[in-house]
């Protein structure tokens, strides 16, 4: 018999009480170990002296098997059988100790499958689970010597240790491998992945920092277009801190009236008369100053605050339009940008109707700008809400037309009034023949569909001349006016020679 501590007989005699050992081993004749637990109970005579002990042994083989099973389940993912996040953290902690002793490197590749939700939505969760299993198998196959973990959902990690590895090469190999089609139940499924990379000691000296930084780098890879890798940088940390701060400040910004509106005039190309206004949100915070609209709008979109922010913008824009109508500019309309989240809201159309009635405005005095991304949405609630807006007379414009999407099939679904040509087309329309031809084709295309055309970003007389020659209906840009405050807008309208 082999004991893991002092002899139980000695312990029993010394302490004069029962001595318990929860786990030890007997050695069988064949050399294998038999796990046991035992209790040594002292035999005490009338004089209080220990004269012996009784030892009771118990075979704990089944308990050991159960404990090992529980431990395995606690450290492994049930679906893929890969190590889980908890195991990765402990493994990384141990590897960091070795790396410090041997002055070696550690790298974490943090993987997230791109648009995995589309797989679940298109093929169902059973197929989604099969895909995750296949991805796990493929990662194990291409990185046989690496520690690979599933962190949850469609996120995986590859842990690299030592000095003899090329991070970029491994990242590229991983992405290329997952780019190959995956066959699931006689269907070929295509998936891409975004990879974030953090490296010890440059990017952190503890396990949680390295995982967090790799995660941040992964989101940077997604933001850059997906299906690529990105290294962690200190700048990403600053961006995350700023984003978190903006998210917190935005919650009270509307109540404190920090978010205001400015307006860029929309001008009739022929008469040069201001006929419309695009409402643009601006945020000036007393501590950190002006916050770019694309920055805080993106945060609001992500966390859902865009619904309350959008309501504030609509409410303010229509109140201002009412004031302009009351002082004689009753021919003006206002154009307001909408987000997908706003259009998903079941009470959105009712809100628009209430605001129009409250301000005694015709529905045609409001134009809603949606992007091609929204127009391509096949969500029933979005399509329904846009159609309801059209039914009550609100005008619909496609903003940034021609940028990022090649399908125009949505024009069959939506009854659109206006196409707004993105400023990227206007920028070199007077100097680049290819841009000129494409812009001319876009204008002709819109007119053939009886749509109004607004050119954004007009800054020069040459650009204006081109747009006049091709009968673009409306223009907006710095050639006429930058975005101005409501007070400046009133002055501009009063001084405009084409007021009537």
Image: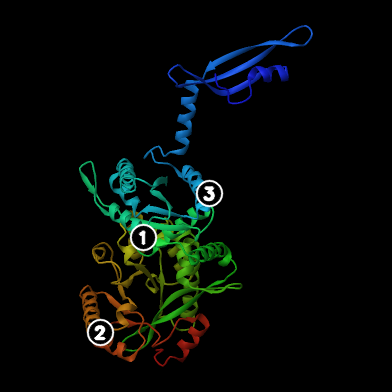
Cα–Cα span, label 2 and label 3: 60 Å
- Pointers 2 and 3 in contact (CB under 8 A)? no
Residue 409 x %, y %: 23, 63
Which residue position is annotated with label 3? 97
Q: Is residue 395 visible?
A: yes
Q: Quadrant of the N terminus?
A: top right
Instruction: Say which of marks 3 and 1 sits in front.
Output: 3
> Which is nearer the eye, 404 or 269?
404
Q: Is residue 348 visible?
A: no
**Direction top: furthest residue:** 46
User: Which element type, helix, strand or loop, lies under badge 1?
Assistant: helix
User: Which element type, helix, strand or loop, lies under badge 2?
Assistant: loop
Residue 235 x %, y %: 49, 67
> Which is nearer the eye, 41 or 190?
41
Cα–Cα span, label 1 and label 2: 38 Å
**Badge 3: how crowded within 10 Å, few (<14), some, or many (20+)?**
few
- Pointers 1 and 2 in contact (CB under 8 A)? no
Quarter occupied by residue 56:
top right
User: Which element type, helix, strand or loop, lies under badge 3?
Assistant: helix
Count up the numbered dots.
3
**Badge 1: how crowded within 10 Å, few (<14), some, or many (20+)?**
few
**Badge 2: how crowded within 10 Å, few (<14), some, or many (20+)?**
few
Relative to 414, is 345 on the left or the right? right
Q: Earlier in the sequence, mark 2 or mark 3?
A: 3
Which residue position is annotated with label 1? 168
Which residue is at a point 44% across and 42% down the rendered structure image? 84
Above or below — where is 127 with respect to 357?
Answer: above
Q: Earlier in the sequence, mark 3 or mark 1?
A: 3
Cα–Cα span, label 3 and label 1: 24 Å
Residue 418 x %, y %: 30, 73
Which residue position is annotated with label 2? 432
Which residue is at a point 50% across and 49% down the rendered structure image? 98
């Amino acid at each position: 018999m082999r004991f893991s501590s002092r002899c139980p007989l000695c312990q029993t005699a010394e302490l004069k009480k029962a001595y318990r050992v929860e786990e030890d081993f007997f050695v069988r004749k064949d050399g294998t170990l038999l796990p046991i637990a035992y209790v040594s109970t002292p035999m005490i005579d009338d004089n209080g002296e220990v004269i012996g002990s009784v030892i009771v042994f118990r075979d704990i083989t089944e308990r050991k098997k159960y404990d090992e099973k529980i431990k395995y389940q606690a450290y492994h993912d049930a679906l893929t059988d890969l190590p889980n996040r908890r195991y990765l953290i402990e493994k990384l902690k141990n590897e960091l100790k070795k790396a410090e002793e041997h002055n070696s490197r550690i790298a974490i590749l943090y993987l997230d499958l791109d648009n995995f939700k589309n797989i679940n939505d298109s093929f169902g969760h059973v197929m989604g689970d099969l895909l995750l299993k296949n991805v796990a198998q493929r990662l194990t196959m291409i990185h046989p010597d690496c520690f690979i973990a599933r962190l949850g959902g469609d996120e995986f990690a590859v842990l690299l240790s030592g000095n003899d590895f090329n991070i970029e090469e491994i990242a590229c190999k991983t992405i290329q491998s997952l780019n190959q089609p995956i066959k699931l139940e006689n269907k070929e499924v295509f998936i891409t992945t975004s990879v974030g990379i953090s490296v010890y000691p440059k990017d952190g000296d503890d396990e949680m920092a390295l995982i967090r930084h790799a995660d941040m780098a992964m989101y940077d890879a997604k933001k850059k277009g997906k299906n690529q890798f990105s290294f962690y940088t200190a700048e990403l940390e600053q961006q995350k801190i700023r984003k978190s701060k903006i998210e917190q400040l935005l919650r009270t910004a509307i109540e404190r009236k920090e978010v205001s509106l400015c307006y860029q005039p929309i001008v009739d190309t022929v008469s040069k008369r201001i006929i419309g206004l695009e409402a643009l949100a601006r945020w000036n915070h007393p501590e950190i100053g002006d916050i770019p609209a694309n920055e805080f709008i993106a945060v609001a979109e992500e966390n859902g605050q865009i619904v309350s922010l959008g309501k504030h913008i609509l409410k303010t824009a229509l109140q201002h339009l009412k004031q302009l109508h009351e002082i004689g500019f009753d021919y003006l309309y206002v154009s307001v940008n909408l987000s997908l989240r706003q259009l998903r809201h079941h009470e959105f159309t009712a809100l628009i109707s209430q605001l129009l009635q409250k301000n005694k405005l015709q529905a045609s005095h409001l134009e809603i700008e949606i992007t091609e991304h929204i127009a391509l949405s096949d969500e029933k609630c979005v399509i329904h809400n846009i159609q309801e807006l059209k039914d009550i007379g609100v005008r619909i414009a496609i903003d940034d037309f021609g940028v990022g999407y090649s399908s125009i099939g949505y024009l069959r679904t939506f009854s659109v009034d206006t196409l707004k040509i993105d400023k990227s087309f206007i920028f070199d329309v007077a100097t680049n023949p290819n841009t000129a031809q494409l812009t001319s084709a876009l204008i002709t295309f819109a007119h053939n569909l009886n749509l109004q055309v607004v050119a954004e970003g007009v800054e020069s007389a040459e650009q204006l001349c081109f747009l006049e020659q091709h009968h673009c209906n409306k223009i907006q840009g710095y050639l006429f006016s930058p975005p101005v405050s409501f007070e400046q807008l009133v002055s501009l309208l009063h001084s405009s020679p084409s007021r009537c």
